[in-house]
Image: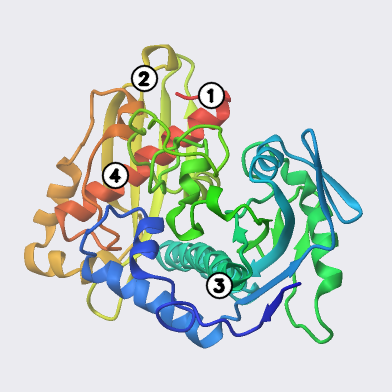
Amino acid sequence: MIELADLSPVIYPREAEPREAEYHRLLGYPPGYELSPRARELAAAARAWYKQHGRPWIFARQADSVSVTGNTIRIQEAAFSSPRLSRSLREAEAHGAVLAAVSAGPELECEAQKLWREEKPDEYFFLEVLGSAIVEELVTMVGARLCAWAEPRQMAILPHYSPGYTEWDIAQQSRLLALIEPAFPPGFGGQIEALESGALRPRKSLLAVFGLTRQVGRIRPLSELVACQNCSFTPCQYRRKPYLGPVNTCSGPRPVEPKLPPHQVNLKALQQWAQNRLALKVQQDGSVDAAFRYDGTTCTNMGRPLAFEYRVRLGPRQEGYPILEQRCAPAVGDTGHTFMCGYLDRGEKLLAAIEQEKPLEGRPLHEVLSWIRPSCAAGCFCDADGRAHKWGLVLETIQYALANREGKEV
């Protein structure tokens, strides 16, 4: 039997810091992209805060008993229904399982909410994504430790699977936690809660099952497997490798699915922006007026806050929501924009250039999803690439809100 309980896990390559490439991938940057000075500043600030205040932890323990009957997996006294997991365990001839829980800790979630209330969307986004990167690194760490334990015992560890993944109802999350939490050692400080919805608190947490088998010759080492190959959510902007179809991880090479859809903005951010920063009004003729408020900071002068208002007018839905009008200008009463280095250099000419920029005007709104624009997280409006990036955020938020309202894609 193996048990891991660590309240101070050392996350590669430095304490509480996931691999830089993984962090950039989750932020939505393409491989090899060089972050702007502002993005590097935000990423460094998020890392520095978490290194000082974050409290990540991991726990894993081998289950007393595991059996598979059809699509039902019985772990100790609890039964779970997951066709995907049961198939993987059955075809690997798994004789056991390790139950795991990892968390980036509640501190990160509290700080992220504080940043959002303070209307610091850039800082909020970078810290939120750092939490996701840390959870991914933690579960990878658990898998690696389990592999190191299993190999000299002539066993192999299967890739982890979690409630909420394909073919495993997230509502069973509380049932899995009920098996894990009582096994915490006395005085273990890890805290985790499963809500009625199946969501976990803290949000940056994960429960998982690692299958255990003695059929070593039939299993590829865990280090060679990428979870994306077994995840069928093809629109995911974070995908690293193509989905290989609904087969178990023990089989050999499989055909690659068609190319994935174009990159999109993080869905959690779109949801937050649509709820808090966007106002939509449908006119009698079916046209739509959209207003979006962007709050950022200057890249100089100690990061002074600034606010810009975006106005977009769309044609009717039956016409594909064509973009009829676009406008961006400083919000009423804003003075922060006058401290931007671009404004100090160009004055009102900069504002005139901003107002003239109307990307995708005349095109259907959905084309923003395939619009390849610069990746730039700067909070100011000095640079044209940064302004194009922000227009992408605004238009995708509008598209997301309208699609959500209709209950289907726009």
- Write down the residue under mark 4: 391
Report the mark closest to the observer, 1 or 2.
Answer: 1
- Tell me which label, 2 or 3, sits earlier in the chain: 3
Where residue 315 appears, as percent x and y from the top left, is 36, 19
CA distance separating discs 2 and 3: 59 Å
Say left or right for 160 vs 225: right
Instruction: Give how far apart the Cα atoms at labels 1 and 2 are.
Output: 18 Å
Q: Which of marks 4 and 1 is nearer the N terminus?
A: 4
Marks 4 and 1, how far apart in space? 23 Å
Residue type pointed to by label 1: Lys
The residue lying at 75 percent from left, 57 percent from top is 96
Quadrant of the snapshot with the C terminus = top left
Identify residue for label 3: 148
Work out whether 83 lies above or below 204.
above
Q: How crowded is mark 4: few (under 14 residues within 10 Å), some or many (20 or more)?
A: many
- Rendered location of residue 69, percent (x, y): 82, 37
Q: Distance between the residues labelled 3 and 4?
A: 48 Å
Circle 3: residue type: Ala
Residue 347: image x %, image y %? 11, 62
Whether residue 298 is visible to the viewer of this picture, yes or no, is no
Question: On residue 143, which mark appears?
Answer: none
Please give the name of the residue rendered at 9% of the width and 54% of the height, measured from the top-left corner. Answer: 349
Depth check: 167 or 340 in front? Answer: 167
Circle 4: residue type: Trp
